[in-house]
Amino acid sequence: MGRVNKSIDGVFIDIVGNNREISCYEQFINQDVINSTQLKNLIKQYDGLVQKNKPIFEKLAMLEEIIIQLRIRHTMNDVKLTMVREYIYARIPFYRKDKKAKDVRIIVDKVDHRPESISELAFNRTFMDIARKKLGQAMDIEIKSNIDNLMSQL
């Protein structure tokens, strides 16, 4: 089981699902059907209300995604560094509904340009400023795309 990160949790995001996850209301509606007229009528009413309000839920989920992303963008907490082959990467938790990875990763520099260890680089203010700037640029692209998408829905 993966780590839980409250900074990328939402309410409506989880309810409406995404292209990999079935919405919570669809899961609820499609549970084992019991042959009962009363139950079928209630499920039909429930489904009708869900379908009527689905666009609102989806817009709320879009707003949540942008809010979560902007919170992370403005705080820039929890930046982690890793070395993979010849590169030094920085990553930060970042929610994107259609991505499995719930973080943004960027290449900060090549290993051969930096003789310091990862733990030393994490305390190097200049290096971390560069990492945060590059992470911020990557996040800005995602956030702008989501805002543009939201505006086209309004």
Image: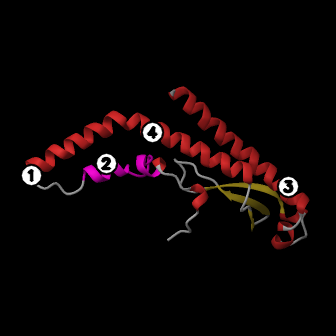
Report the amino acid beneath label 1. Ser
Report the amino acid beneath label 4. Glu
Q: Residue at x 56, y 45 (%)?
A: 65
In the rendered image, the vertical position of residue 112 relative to residue 55, given as above or below: below
Report the amino acid beneath label 3. Asp
Look at the numbered disc 3 and give the secondary structure of its residue. Answer: helix
Look at the numbered disc 2 and give the secondary structure of its residue. Answer: helix
Q: For mark 3, what is the residue? A: 129
Look at the numbered disc 4 and give the secondary structure of its residue. Answer: helix
Q: For mark 4, what is the residue? A: 58
Query: Disc 2 or 1, which lies upstream in sequence?
Result: 2
**Mark linked to residue 36:** 1
Q: Which residues are magenta?
A: 14-30
Mark 4 packing: few (<14 Cα in 10 Å), some, or many (20+)? some
Query: Disc 3 or 2, which lies upstream in sequence?
Result: 2
Query: Disc 4 or 2, which lies upstream in sequence?
Result: 2
Q: Residue at x 19, y 57 (%)?
A: 32
Alpha-carbon span between mark 3 and mark 1: 62 Å
Alpha-carbon span between mark 2 and mark 1: 19 Å
Q: Are marks 1 and 4 in contact (CB under 8 Å)?
A: no
Alpha-carbon span between mark 4 and mark 2: 14 Å
Mark 3 packing: few (<14 Cα in 10 Å), some, or many (20+)? few
Q: Is residue 23 magenta?
A: yes
Q: For mark 2, what is the residue? A: 26
